[in-house]
Amino acid sequence: MSTVLDELLDWAYSQAVGFLGAFFALMGNMGVELFDLLWVQAVVQFFSQLGWALFAVSLVVSFFEFGIEYSSGRGNIRHTAINCLKGFMAVSLFSTVPVRLYALSISLQASFTASITGLGSGIGELGQSIITKLTTAEGLTSAAVDFIFGGPTFNPIMMLFCVILMAYAVIKVFFANLKRGGILLIQIAVGSLYMFSVPRGYSDGFTQWCKQVIGLCLTAFLQSTILTAGLMAFTDHALLGLGLMLSAGEVPRIAGAFGLDTSTRASLSSAVHTAQMAVNTTKVIASAVSK
């Protein structure tokens, strides 16, 4: 009887954790659905047009720079053409690829959490699991094992401590998922400002922007997946499960240590500098043409 109860509790706990993983996936899909709103599409379209305008100005500037370098014998038409091609690809894709990549990461996270937790498994699978466990000697000897802490070693203070840490890990991941759609929109807006520098061969800032987009999508996938894995491991190994759950909150910091920083502060300051340089260069060209 104890084994049947343990199996029922395990199944109920797995379904609850699976629901939590599905809920995080639903929150991620809300970030994707944010880009289906008309006003968000209008904002993205505005920054896309801004990117094309900066790209056109950058092409003119790059031709002027090539002419100046060619007159001094240092011009390289192959490098100029490659940089222009890079700029064309960047301006064509910077407003669409991040959304598609983010949607893919959320879809993968939902599939992984459903597989880990067995979400959607019915009573038939549960009954078969109980029968299989009861027909083995190992299952019969473990019939008295407690659901979480192992029967006689149950400690209410330890349970309260674990519940507090679990709540902290879940709430931290919850608020991180809540703001990712807005962060992605900000990153798309900031990415448009780099379209002035890429055709001219200055692609370091845009490369860092690409790393930030990848870091955001990687964090969206790993945080919820590791949190779900920690919740599932908690029933058999409480401290190991807590370690996994707490490590989910460290994913952005670890990604940033490897160059996949998910914050927008460095990207925004670099993009503002690029925009100021674009305005100053345009003024210089306009004054030169007027003369």
Image (tube, grey):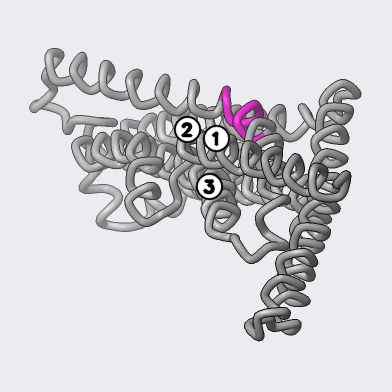
Residue 265: mark in rendering: 2
Element on which disc 2 rests = helix
Q: Are marks 1 and 2 in contact (CB under 8 Å)?
A: yes
- Work out whether residue 103 or residue 159 is closer to the camera in this orientation and state it: 103
Mark positioned earlier in the residue sequence (2 or 3): 3
Kind of residue at disc 1: Leu
Classify residue 120 by image quadrant: top right
Q: Residue at x 79, y 70 (%)?
A: 85
User: How far apart, in angstroms, are the residues tagged by discs 2 and 3?
Assistant: 11 Å
Judged left or right of residue 201, residue 81 is: right
The N terminus lies in which quarter of the figure? top left
Give the residue number, with chain letter if any, for mark 3.
Answer: 212
Q: Residues within 10 Å of mark 2 (few under 14, many from 20)?
A: few
Kind of residue at disc 2: Arg
Mark positioned earlier in the residue sequence (1 or 3): 3
Q: How many numbered discs, if any?
A: 3
Kind of residue at disc 3: Gln
Q: Residue at x 18, y 18 (%)?
A: 161
Classify residue 24 by image quadrant: top right
Q: Are marks 1 and 3 in contact (CB under 8 Å)?
A: no
Give the residue number, with chain letter if any, for mark 1.
Answer: 268
Q: Which residues are magenta?
A: 178-184
Asked whether 183 falls inside the magenta stretch, the response is: yes
Judged left or right of residue 175, residue 288 is: right
